[in-house]
Amino acid sequence: MEQPPETPKPGAAAGELPGQKPEGAHVEAGPHPPKEAERKNLPKPSPGRATPDQPDQPDQRSAELARNLNNLASEVVVADEWGLFKDARPEAVAEQPPPIYQTLALAYQALAAGRLDEVEVGLLTGRAALNRAQNGDRVWQLNNHFGFLPLVFIAFSTLLVHWFVFQRWLAVSGPDIITHAAFAGMVGAVLRSLYWLQFQTGKGLLRPRWFTSFIVAPPIGAIFGWLVSLLVKSAAQVVSKGTVETDWRTVSLLAAFAGFKWEWALGWLEEAARSIQTRMKDKTPAKPKS
């Protein structure tokens, strides 16, 4: 399709060039460059102050180094909890902190004084010492690289809950287990544990003290799933006055989310308890005045 012809501009018919001022028009003079004396009096930007043309690079570098130093310190504390530095100290000074803590302390002092080059040297020295300690410990590698013990604890706890709760106590088997709210809550808790495990191992910050949470997560999820199912069914009975049957898929979805998000389940149960308590107070007859 051909384009429509352009409308000629006012000056094109007269043969004037684009941008050419017509004769007799007032032309404003452009800004003249400052003279030598004026150049000396111009304000000079300070070295540590940002300008529109030049961003504040020292502050950005200092903030980035501080963030890297804090991350390294967190990894060092976790590695010390795993006992990675106990073999690097002689028995005479076993009660003293590992040398890597002295490296971090010097780096923090240099950061406070603004000696950023020394901070970078301290970061490299501390990272090298931490890598040597991590590479020499097989237990740390198995757990922080592959999550070995947490996975064993999650699997053992899940099988134990399945055997004790569903097979021995509730006597539920086959397809009926999938429709049970407690099973959905347990699945949500397992998902929560796996998500938390990959998040911490990805940063190398898995701590031994968190092993208990992987053991207790499946039973806690099953309990939360069962409680939320009771709440949903009770609310449906109150709203519909017994005329509506709750769908097991909806109940299982809420139960699974309760097993994954414990804070949400606790908040919902607390809100329901307050509502029931308020209704009970409203229905309680007032005592007659004597």
Image: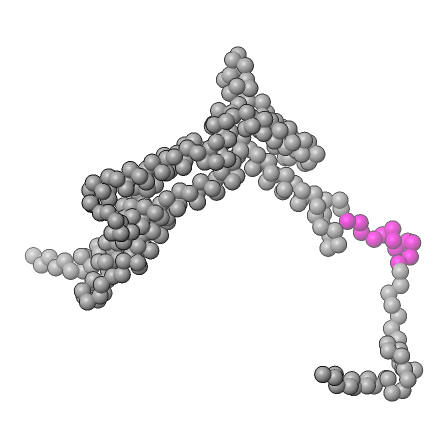
Left-right relation of 81 to 5 = left
Left-right relation of 20 to 129 = right
For residue 58, above or below residue 102: below
- Report if residue 258 is visible in the image: no
Which residues, given as a range, are shown in magenta? 34-45
Name the foreground residue: 249 vs 108. 249
The residue sitting at the left extreme is 290
Q: Quadrant of residue 287?
A: bottom left
Is 39 a magenta residue? Answer: yes
Q: Which image quarter holds the N terminus?
A: bottom right
Name the foreground residue: 209 vs 49. 209
Name the foreground residue: 285 vs 164. 164
Left-right relation of 24 to 115 = right
Is 41 a magenta residue? Answer: yes
Question: Measuring 38% from the left and 35% from the top, which residue is drawn there?
Answer: 152
The residue sitting at the front extreme is 174
Residue 149, percent across and down?
41, 33
Name the foreground residue: 1 vs 278. 1
Question: Measuring 36% from the left and 38% from the top, which residue is drawn there?
Answer: 155
Q: Quadrant of residue 24?
A: bottom right
Residue 84, percent across and down?
51, 25
Question: Measuring 20% from the left and 42% from the top, which residue is drawn there?
Answer: 169
The residue sitting at the top extreme is 92
- Report if residue 178 is visible in the image: yes
For residue 139, above or below residue 285: above
